[in-house]
Amino acid sequence: MTRIPDEADAATRALLEWVADAKPEPLHGMSANDARATFNERRLRTDLDPIDIARVEDRTIDGPAGPLPVRLYAPRSADKGTLPLFIYYHGGGFVIGDLDSHDSVCRRFARGGDCLVMAVDYRLAPEHPYPAAAEDAVAALDWAVANAQVIGADPKRLAIGGDSAGGNLAAIAAQHAREKSYDQLLLQALIYPLVDPVNQTASRDRFADVFPIDRDAIDWFNRCYFPDEARIGEPYAAPGLVDDLSNLAPALVITAGLDPLVDEGAQYADRLSAAGVPVSYHCHEGTIHGFMGMGKVLPHAEQTIDRVTRALDDAFASKAA
């Protein structure tokens, strides 16, 4: 049974009480395919409803293992001016999640940020273990830099972001952007990111029994994505372990206070700031990991969308034509 921390706010407590009463089967006890289907079905109950925007388009780009599916979201017609681009990587422990699971938030990022959003359907484990997801994430960034105008994006105004495992991929992509001298990368938005799978922080112990990513779930995700444990500390696995974090894009780091990953997110924000990277950090103290997919019951999702879109507005305005 999941524990309900004393620090939980009212909305989070109500959700956790419902989970405790419902006793849902844990995803980590299922096959990967069954876990994906169950995750998507459950998310429909709690996710924000989709909103209408001008254009949503599925297409493929060149990936390291063949065509890489992406979904483009445009808040207005291209004839009203070129849009900046926000590349988004979904969460799900590198095992679950897809373009549909994060469709509602990407629509809101596009409208609120008045930008083109490109969601990336990177390869999932265990069928495609590490470093497949990271390679796809970096390839999507490289493709966007080279082909921004093909999709109607401003090649001089780019941002990246992601939640959970997607936050891991966004942090990796930001470090890659530094190595490639992509000075058009203006923001990295990391939402309760997994940046240090090696470090057993205090929060990993403190919230090891809290829904939705208790210790068993985290261990299952890691076994699926990192079958070779010797590689779990590599830069494409653990961006938080990279020694030099200087000269990275400005960062917005958002965490959840009752999340096993909260300490590593906060520590990464501190290390970025110490390295001279402009950082804005915010912790939703009373809530849990995964709140971006629980916007019908947790206000933190829309609050975070607003925070991200304001950061996008500011970043893109700094390089407006």
Image (tube, rainbow, N blue to C red):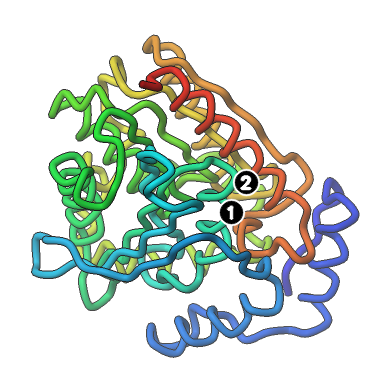
Q: For the C terminus, give its image quadrant.
A: top left
- Would you place residue 251 above or below residue 193 in this image? above
Q: For the N terminus, give its image quadrant.
A: bottom right
Residue 262 in which image quadrant:
top right
Q: Residue at x 72, y 69 (%)?
A: 2
| Most distant residue in the front direction | 79
Q: Residue at x 20, y 57 (%)?
A: 136
Which sits in the foreground, 4 or 87?
A: 87
Rate crowding at label 2 as few (under 14), some (14 to 19) or many (20 or more) other CA atoms within 10 Å: some
Please tell me the numbered disc located at residue 305.
Answer: 2
Please tell me the numbered disc located at residue 91.
Answer: none
> Residue 77 placed where, x, y %?
44, 53
Rate crowding at label 1 as few (under 14), some (14 to 19) or many (20 or more) other CA atoms within 10 Å: many
- Would you place residue 65 above or below residue 89 in this image? below
Q: Secondary structure at mark 2?
A: helix
Three-letter amino acid code of the residue under disc 2: Ile
Q: Residue at x 66, y 62 (%)?
A: 209
Question: How many marks do you count on the picture?
Answer: 2
Residue 172 falls left or right of residue 74? left
Which sits in the foreground, 3 or 301?
A: 301
Which sits in the foreground, 154 or 248?
A: 154
- Would you place residue 97 above or below residue 113 in this image? below
Q: Mark 2 vs mark 1: give the one in front.
A: 1
Please tell me the numbered disc located at residue 108.
Answer: 1
The answer to whether any part of residue 255 appears in the image is: yes
> Residue 224 placed where, x, y %?
31, 71
Three-letter amino acid code of the residue under disc 1: Arg
The answer to whether any part of residue 164 appears in the image is: no
Q: Earlier in the sequence, mark 2 or mark 1?
A: 1
Q: Residue at x 25, y 43 (%)?
A: 233
Q: CB of mark 2 within 8 Å of CB of mark 1?
A: yes
